[in-house]
Amino acid sequence: MLEGLDPEQRAVATTLHGPVCVLAGAGTGKTRAITHRIAYGVLAGVYQPATVLAVTFTVRAAGEMRGRLRQLGAGGVQARTFHSAALRQLQYFWPKAVGGELPRLLESKYSLVAEAASRCRMRLQRLELRDVTGEIEWAKVTQTTPDDYPAVVAKLSREVPRDTAETARVYATYEQLKQERGAIDFEDVLLLTVGILTDRHDIAEIVRRQYQHFVVDEYQDVSPLQQRLLTLWLGDRDSLCVVGDASQTIYSFTGATPDHLLNFRARHPEATLVKLVRDYRSTPQVVHLANGLLDQAKGRAAEHRLELVSQRPAGPDPVFAEHPDEPAEAEATARRIRDLLTPVAEGGPGVPASEIAVLYRVNAQSEVYEQALTDAGVPYQLRGAERFFDRPEIRQARLALRGAARAGGNDAAVDGAVDLAGQVGAVLAATGWTPEPPAGSGAARDRWESLRSLVRLAEDFERARPGATLADFVTEVDERAAAQHAPTVEGVTLASLHAAKGLEWDAVFLVGLTDGTLPITHARTAEQVEEERRLLYVGVTRARRHLTLSWALARSPGGRAGRRPSRFLDGLRPGSSVRSAGSGAGGGVERGAGRSRRPRGPVRCRVCGRTLTEATEVKLRRCADCPSSMDEALYERLRAWRLDRAKELSRPAYAVFTDVTLMAIAEDVPGSEDELARISGVGPHKLRQFGAEVLALCAGEELPETGSDQESVEDSGDSEESRENGLRPPEKSA
């Protein structure tokens, strides 16, 4: 059970008692760690499967967790969302606690909120309706009543879409309408469960006897109401494992707060703390950019940031692309995607369409990319649009599969198929599916891709369960439909950054990265701007290998080029520097005050004067072929020091400083903190951590002996980094 886990994951898996807090960075294998922890506890006899409740935030994540637990031999463990777990308890205990049947659960609030607004003599447009509905949801998860709403908003200085008194009236009328119609909404599910467990100690004790061990994933997204429910589930026990990353807190508008995660050890001083920082998802280039993005972050979440260390081989550098207008940006993105799709046999990367994503800040940005991909003949799917199992062709396919399973596969076409995927394909053929895709794109291609995903799911299912029957597959599909755990559709994913949370792709395109879009215009306070930075961080860390960040200077062709790249890219894209306080938008929010910045504008070679474009050349401020002024003795001292520090920190050498950064230091030989800060690759975090020692070495001072053994193995990480950059220090003989 513990084979294949790294030391930190193993620590999570084997710590089965008492409160446990796991700070897990993006791509560090947190789901693997916590599912192995549960399975290890079950196999060791510490947990009974039925007494464990694992809670996460999306039905997809819960479905994935259940699948992994089944494979690990812990299939009896419950893995659910907060709402799903609460709804089961509410349905079971409502007759005993209240009497009668549980009120009808609303599928959507929109129609009732619109009616409530009409009763208040307000007519809301579609976007206004969405905004007011969002405010009602926020108020309910923060346990704010309609009467208290205006005062709470004022106290929190919360930016709201409309007059608080108007919203409070709609909120109160909406609650009245629900009562009249005998209905409840999703927030009521949590509120009513909390109410029953608070008022009925006998029912609370039944729940606590049932569930004795808890695991909560994405703990940084817990709302006050969800935390209250978790506290009631726990009672006076402490068998709780929470997992989260404050740097991925992006849902504050729904009431989520990282405070419960950050305050966990204050509430549980005896808690075991484990940090997962080994990134198995992304290449060192992507991880370096992600770390650099958070180097400039501020606030409490930034103080607890995790510096990731990539465990993957080197890959291509992230691409920063500027375009004259949005259609040009979309067309360039579509061309680049076509290049990525080129099969390996034809000399291309051969990235599958399902492993490519285009991510944007707001859904309104998708239209121009839909058009560009259609024009390029590239299939795509919109995430957050119609749900997979609600599509007409999938509903029809499920009916056909269910009928074939009941018939026992006696149909001649089905009976003649040797494997499960062949049987599924034969059944779907009756609905119009063919093994070969239709020509072009559009609705016919979308329908084919949906059905093809069921055939692929059958292939994967048979590999996982050799000998599985058509009836077994139908059961699997039904379970997935109940959990909305859709299979992969072979098409490029178009999604908002919020909808991309928890997902990953081989290639990610982050588009429309301009000030006013990211950070979005209505992010005015320092806290709101920092959440926008974390949103970009989430986008960056979705990429495994290929990452492109792009922006357009104008909206339309021929328009005024008045936009500027997102301030979050300052100091990260070649030739840029971090903006000083007060420069640009953002309500005067300070960004990195008190630190000297690198020069703005194009970076030119200090030797020949040529404008530099390659990242490594920009770092060194010279062409790769121009002569170096490096102090070679200092460079060797810096490398020896870096090895010692890397061993002390149990990190690869390049995680301290890369070869190129050490070369830049040995060429410039800084004499002060300001001069050292101007060198690319020396961010605020590394300046604080290593600045004094580096400056001492530059001044020729000896550092205290650490006892580290300087072996030739020191180059194991650095030579790879040097090869990737194509730049070497000058030969000593020169």
Image: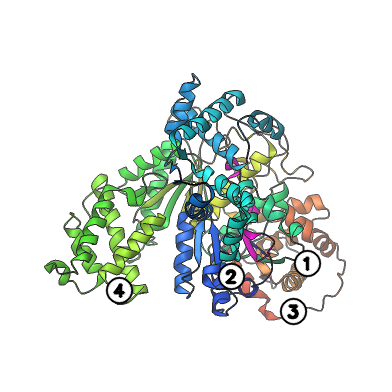
Residue at 15 percent of width and 69 percent of height:
410
Residues at badges 1 and 3 in contact (C-beta under 8 Å)?
A: no
Q: Locate residue 484, reporting x and y percent.
A: 40, 54
Q: Nearer the viewer, mark 1 or mark 3?
A: 3
Q: CA distance from mark 3 to mark 2?
A: 19 Å
Q: Nearer the viewer, mark 4 or mark 2?
A: 4
Residues at badges 1 and 4 in contact (C-beta under 8 Å)?
A: no
Q: Nearer the viewer, mark 1 or mark 4?
A: 4
Q: CA distance from mark 2 to mark 1?
A: 21 Å
Q: Which mark is residue 468?
A: 4
Residue at 53 percent of width and 43 percent of height:
187
| Foreground pick, 63 / 144 | 144
Q: Which mark is residue 634?
A: 1
Q: From the viewer's perspective, is 556 left or right of 210?
A: left
Q: Locate residue 190, reporting x and y percent.
A: 55, 47
Q: Locate residue 554, reporting x and y percent.
A: 49, 32
**Which tag, 1 or 4, sits closer to the chain's start?**
4
| Foreground pick, 154 / 151 | 151
Q: Amino acid at mark 2?
A: Glu
Per the rendered image, the range of residues in magenta is 233-255
Q: Which mark is residue 710?
A: 3
Q: Secondary structure at mark 4?
A: loop
- Please name the residue that numbered disc 2 is placed on: 720
Q: Locate residue 626, reporting x and y percent.
A: 63, 58
Would you say residue 303 sits in the magenta stretch?
no
Badge 2, how many Cα within 10 Å: few under 14, some, many 20+? some
**Which tag, 2 or 1, sits closer to the chain's start?**
1
Badge 4, how many Cα within 10 Å: few under 14, some, many 20+? some
> Residue 244: which quarter of the image?
bottom right
Q: Height in image: 661 above or below 37? A: above
Q: Amino acid at mark 4?
A: Ala
